[in-house]
């Protein structure tokens, strides 16, 4: 156990040092995810105009069917931005996010393996495009598992909130916080279990099935590192997730337009978290692979 702890600690230290050095000195690495962030901001702005006259008449039938007439009027109509943005953000994350992850992984690999520590985003884009189907399958597996777990947790939370009395003596407002934290941790653990799969698809030129098998093997030997590199940054997003969980209450206690602050904070944090996780996970895998090659020699 002590040797395992030292090994994991050493790997983490090297990974974080190289990650933050790379992000500090090669800021172009942020560009792929910054593009997604820009599109998310444009989406929020577009949704704001969509809920205003005269465009709102085109979505009125959908709003009336699923949410009711009150959501066509201020301030409830602002909540539509959050609802619609969730689906738009999911689409961007699955399609464009998968591609940009591949670009970033390729760029980090180029930087690490070349003698002069350089990388070409264009070359990374080409490699990500060639391996896109395998990258996308892995993303869809993770998204589906997260959504299934989230749906189950929401059903449990709904039953708790529907009770006349507080469940286990815990107030309903506190159960919302507990449920949101549990959803964040469990979805983070799912991402931990698949953390290195896309790196293996790009770095080792494997198909998604071989990459998954090698990923699980790697996770088994480096679970603590995976937890620290993936789950720890994701927990930084919890405050935003808690605000989103009871957004209407927050709007009532402050001003309705606070919604834009929450969504904006989520977009910016998402950029930072995605960049740090993608770069650090890639570096950790490359570091461990290099060590394995040196041991064989």
Image: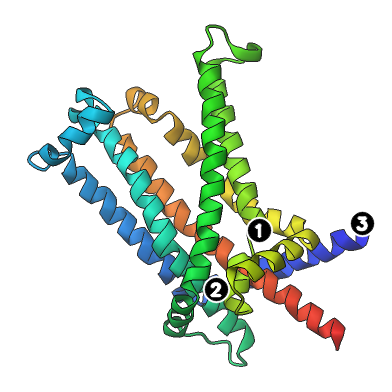
Q: How many C-alpha atoms fall within 10 Å of the one at disc 3: few (<14), some, or many (≥20)? A: few
User: Do the CB atoms of the residues marked 2 and 3 lie less than 8 Å apart?
Assistant: no
Q: How many C-alpha atoms fall within 10 Å of the one at disc 2: few (<14), some, or many (≥20)? A: many
In the image, residue 203 sits, relative to residue 34, either above or below, namely below
Point out the tag, 1 or 3, that comes first from the N-terminus.
Answer: 3
Left or right of 60? Residue 236 is: right
Q: Secondary structure at mark 3?
A: loop
Left or right of 35? Residue 11 is: right
Q: Residue at x 47, y 79 (%)?
A: 130
Residue where numbered disc 3 is placed: 1
The alpha-carbon separation of the residues under discs 1 and 2 comes to: 15 Å
Point out the tag, 2 or 3, that comes first from the N-terminus.
Answer: 3
In percent of width and height, residue 167 lies at 61, 13
Q: How many C-alpha atoms fall within 10 Å of the one at disc 1: few (<14), some, or many (≥20)? A: many
In the image, residue 120 sits, relative to residue 91, either above or below, namely below
Decide if residue 62 is in sight here: yes
Query: Could you say which quadrant of the image residue 14 lies in?
Result: bottom right
Point out the tag, 1 or 2, that comes first from the N-terminus.
Answer: 2
In percent of width and height, residue 232 lies at 64, 50
Outermost residue toward the top? Answer: 164
Residue 105 shows which numbered tag? 2
The alpha-carbon separation of the residues under discs 2 and 3 comes to: 31 Å
Query: Could you say which quadrant of the image residue 184 lies in?
Result: top right
Q: Secondary structure at mark 1?
A: helix
The alpha-carbon separation of the residues under discs 1 and 3 comes to: 20 Å
In the image, 273 versus 139, the foreground residue is: 139
Residue where numbered disc 1 is placed: 229
Q: Residue at x 68, y 76 (%)?
A: 286
Q: Residue at x 59, y 28 (%)?
A: 178
Check the picture and name the quadrant holding the C terminus. bottom right
In percent of width and height, residue 246 lies at 43, 28
């Amino acid at each position: 156990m002590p040797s395992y702890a030292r090994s994991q600690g050493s790997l983490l230290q090297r990974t974080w040092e190289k990650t933050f050095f790379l992000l500090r000195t090669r800021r172009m690495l942020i560009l792929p995810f910054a593009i997604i962030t820009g599109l998310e901001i444009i989406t929020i702005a577009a949704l704001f105009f969509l809920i205003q006259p005269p465009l709102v008449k085109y979505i009125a039938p959908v709003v009336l069917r699923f949410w009711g007439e009150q959501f066509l009027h201020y301030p409830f109509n602002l909540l539509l931005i959050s609802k619609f943005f969730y689906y738009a953000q999911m689409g961007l994350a699955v399609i464009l996010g998968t591609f940009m992850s591949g670009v970033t992984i390729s760029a980090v690999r180029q930087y690490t393996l070349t003698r002069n520590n350089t990388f070409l985003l264009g070359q990374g884009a080409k490699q990500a495009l060639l391996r896109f189907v395998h990258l996308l399958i892995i993303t869809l597996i993770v998204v589906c598992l997260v959504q299934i777990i989230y749906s189950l947790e929401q059903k449990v939370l709904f039953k708790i909130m529907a009770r006349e009395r507080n469940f286990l003596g815990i107030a309903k407002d506190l159960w919302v916080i507990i449920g949101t934290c549990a959803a964040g941790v469990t979805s983070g653990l799912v991402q931990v279990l698949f953390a290195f799969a896309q790196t293996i698809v790009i770095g080792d030129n494997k198909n998604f099935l071989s990459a998954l098998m090698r990923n699980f093997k790697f996770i088994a030997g480096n679970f603590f590192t995976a937890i620290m590199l993936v789950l720890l940054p994701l927990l930084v997003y919890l405050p935003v997730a808690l605000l989103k969980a009871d957004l209407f209450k927050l709007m009532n206690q402050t001003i309705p337009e606070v919604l834009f602050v929450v969504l904006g904070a989520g977009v910016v944090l998402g950029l930072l978290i995605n960049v740090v996780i993608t770069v650090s996970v890639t570096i950790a895998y490359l570091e461990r692979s290099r060590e394995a090659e040196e041991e064989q020699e």
